[in-house]
Image: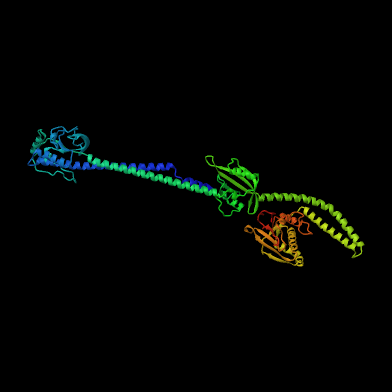
Amino acid sequence: MSPNSRKARTSRGAYLPITYAVVAICVLAAVLVIMTLRDVDRGRAHVLDVLDRKAMSMLTFLRFDMRTELVSPIWSPDRLQFFAQEIANRENLTYMALVTEEGRIVVHSDPALVGTQLGEWETPMAPEQRPHIDRRRRMVEISEQGFVGVEEYVARIDATPANICNPAPQARGRRRLLPPVRCAPALVAERLAGLLGDPVEETSELSIYAVVALDPSELESVYLASRDRALVLAGALLAIGAAAIYFLFVSTSYRSTQTALANMESYTDNVIESMASGLVSVDPDSHVVRVNSRARALFGLGERSVRGEPIESVVRFEEGGARSEIESVLSGASRPVETEIGIETGDGRVPVEVSASPLRDEAGERSGAVLLFQDLREIEALKDEVERERHLAALGRLAAGVAHEVRNPLSSLKGFAQFLRSKFNPGSEEERYSNIMIEEVERLDRVVQELLDFAKPVTAELKESDINAIVEDALSLVTEDAAFRNVETVRDLSERLPAVMVDGDQLRQVLLNVLLNGIEAMRDGGRLTIRTSLRGDEQSQVAVEVADTGVGMSNEELEKLFEPFYTTKPEGTGLGLTIVSRLIDQNHGRLAVKSAPGEGTTFTISFPVVGTVPDDVGSEER
């Protein structure tokens, strides 16, 4: 998986989908609802527990008081009635009563209800099936209040006279609630008969029910207020949690969007800066927005900021029809333009291919234009090289034909001149003319031989060679000539240079030609320096540098230096450096020439080290 795809997947995973936020809010709401319902249930249970405890204590107290009064020496039914009224008023009970199994009231906190039926009384279950305390919710009518909801608690009291005087034994480990008392069952039966209004025997199984009714409204109001507070708090927590989750969602999405935009911007910048073509983008007013590094190098801008400057001050197009086409795109034309044009830079005119396209925003409105520049200098140099090679090939064919046609007559002329010289007296004027004729014929013969060498196809026999050894051989051939012309030769040869793949004889011929040119350029003497070294990226080139301190050359002379038959020497043929260029091409080398009038000339010949790939072989740099 590529780094870009991993980055894209990471950026997508950084986003928090809205579904996640909704699910999180729903989960939070469910948790708060459950917690609130549990709090509400606990509040309701607490209310019932308070009521149960209070009712239990009242019922126990009532049962104990009734038993105590039945066996008391100072018995009076009014005492039970007074007790019920007093306890109901003091404990804020709705009512307190004693009723028979049929529901008839025998004691009530409201004396007016004694003897009446207690509401919708249900026939009690059998004693063995009956719970200790029965609780039920019911609506009762209260004077001055109407019908109100109360919690009614009912407890059975065993009113059998014999059992009152002799309570049943308690199970082991349980505390006796009603202690045994001394009484007569007959007396208790008599008092019960007076209380109930019905005859009661000593052995009659009798049940009386203690009833306590509590008004839960006050506790329920507290409970409801607590419930409302819990609901409000839950709602507030839900709102805060939802807001926090939403804020987290928005914040995460914003950060993710910013990260994605930053990654996209960085990626776009890398793409633009890595382009082999120069790029310039402008706004609708033709002011520069963006310039990549290739365009900066092409226009010679350096590190100068040009953002906001007019395009005319950054790119200086030459006049012509191509310029008007480009300007039409900058002014809003919808059709892209691709054309060739020259631009003016600090290094002079540079031919470029320009591709201009308008830019549109999402609404289709013009937002500027983008211009791509392709440097055509190398392409034009290649075209010139191809044209020169074609021209040289044609010239070579012509030279070969002319040389063959001229060489035979030259041999005849030389023979006749030598014959005539033999007929003249030594030292005579005729002999001197004959010698001049012979010398000129020999000069023409040399020119013809160079023409044949120029026209002859060159094939290099490449093999691993020690370039220092070849340089020493070439220097040995020109040392005497240099000394005769008062030229000092200086060697600066690097040791242990790697081998190069060249034709030794051809390279020796190249060096001999360049060395002789340097010596001849120093008419009044000077210094001829020959230097070898490693150059290029990772030292992949072996270079031979030949520098003289002669008269030098102008830019016009450098432009014509390798043209056939161009020479600045009175006796030169103009083919020497042309042949040198061809030989260097055959040996996969590069030739560079630097010169200035009065500052001498430097020829640099470089070849790739064995095992490396030749780069721009055969090119000439001036």
Residue at position x 71%, y 49% in the image: 386
Residue at position x 52%, y 39% in the image: 363
- Asked which quadrant contains residue 45, the reply is top left
Q: Position of residue 543 (x, y in %)?
A: 68, 60
Residue 131 is at least partly visible in this image = no
- Asked which quadrant contains residue 508, the reply is bottom right
Above or below, comparing residue 551 to residue 317 in the picture: below
Q: Nearer the viewer, residue 162 or 98?
A: 98
Q: Position of residue 254 (x, y in %)?
A: 45, 46
Residue at position x 64%, y 44% in the image: 322
Q: Position of residue 617 (x, y in %)?
A: 68, 54
Q: Position of residue 70 (x, y in %)?
A: 10, 40
In this image, 117 relative to 424: left or right?
left
Above or below, comparing residue 477 to residue 238 in the picture: below
| Quadrant of the frame with the C terminus | bottom right
Residue 221 is at least partly visible in this image = yes
Q: Nearer the viewer, residue 80 or 344?
A: 344
Above or below, comparing residue 539 to residue 365 in the picture: below
In this image, 78 relative to 569: left or right?
left
- Asked which quadrant contains residue 529, the reply is bottom right
In this image, 342 relative to 139: left or right?
right
